[in-house]
Amino acid sequence: MNKKETFAQKVIEFNKNLQYIGKLPPDFQVLNPYHNNPETILVMQKFYYKFYNDYNKRKFIIGINPSRHGAGVTGVPFTDTKRLESACGITMHSAHTHEISSVFMYDMINYFGGVKSFYQKFYINSPFPLAIVKKAKENIWLNANYYDDKKLFENVKDFMLLSLKQHISLGLDTSEVFILGKKNATFIEILNKEHQLFNKLTILEHPRFIQQYKLKNKQLYIDKYILTLNNAIV
């Protein structure tokens, strides 16, 4: 990539060219928001130009894969349309979504010091950066994780590795990365052991797990995130 490009321009180019054409097991599908909704590209561009239009080297926070109500609609990781508007100041007109991981992430970002401060230092994305859904019954599709099915992981593994390398090439600090979710970390560790992508892997509980099962202790998890992330940028 051209060194003169800003971080924002590199991310936008990456997202616009995202396409998964590999195999999938029966009853799984990949959703590409950049192909499905023209407004997704517009709001995604607004977001990255607003918060990433610089040459800063950022720490990498690694999710699993986008949900169909978060980045699967907005094109912005862990960001539903509610948080896109209320926290980031960007309105999406063609869709209205609520995603519980987004609630935790933006509560944490608020404690960190707000979106401008947070996104200057951190970049969030996923090893499989497109939404995956699985057919539950006729005409009902549910969110799926890349590791939910052994064959699915085998199918998408090479694409995940390529995506991680492309994320790194945006200008990320690989000395320490933050992996959301313990099971996610197990699979990232496999890839990292084979290809030495990152020096240190630090695991944090996934926002969805916290919101769904540990809500009473949410503030403790926010504090853990803040302490862990602040220690990395000292």
Image (spheres, helix red, strand yellow):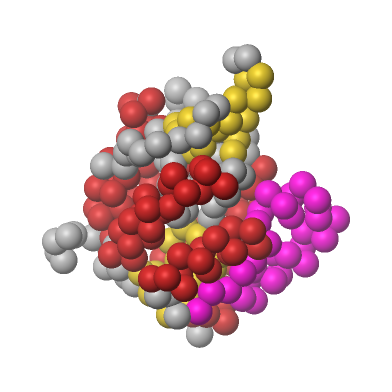
Residue 84 in sight: no
Q: Position of residue 208 (x, y in %)?
A: 68, 49
Q: Is the residue 139 above or below the residue 168 in the image?
A: above
Q: Does residue 23 show up magenta in the picture?
A: no
Q: Is residue 185 above or below residue 105?
A: below
Question: In the rendered image of this protein, does residue 174 appear above or below residue 61?
Answer: below
At 65% from the left and 25% from the top, the residue drawn is 136
- Where is residue 166? Give x, y as percent: 31, 58
Q: Would residue 99 be seen by someone viewing this image from the given angle?
A: yes
Q: Residue 66 vs residue 136: left or right?
A: left
Taking the view exactly as shown, the residue that stands out farthest to the right is: 216
Seen in the image, is 55 located left or right of residue 2? Answer: right
Image point 34% across, 29% down: which residue?
Answer: 35
- Which of the 4 image quarters holds residue 155? top left
- Specify the segment rendered in magenta: 200-228
Q: Name the quadrant containing residue 220.
A: bottom right
Q: Which residue is painted at 63% across and 14% down in the image?
A: 138
Q: Is 31 positioned to the left or the right of 96 in the image?
A: left
In the image shown, does 141 or 21 lie closer to the viewer? 21
Residue furthest to the bottom in view is 234
Pick the front one: 226 or 156: 156
| Rendered location of residue 190, percent (x, y) | 51, 66
Image location of residue 199, percent across then percent down: 45, 80
For the point 50% across and 25% down, the residue is 95
Look at the image and tell me in which quarter the N terminus lies: bottom left
Per the picture, the main secondary structure of the magenta-coloured stretch is helix
Give the number of marks.
0
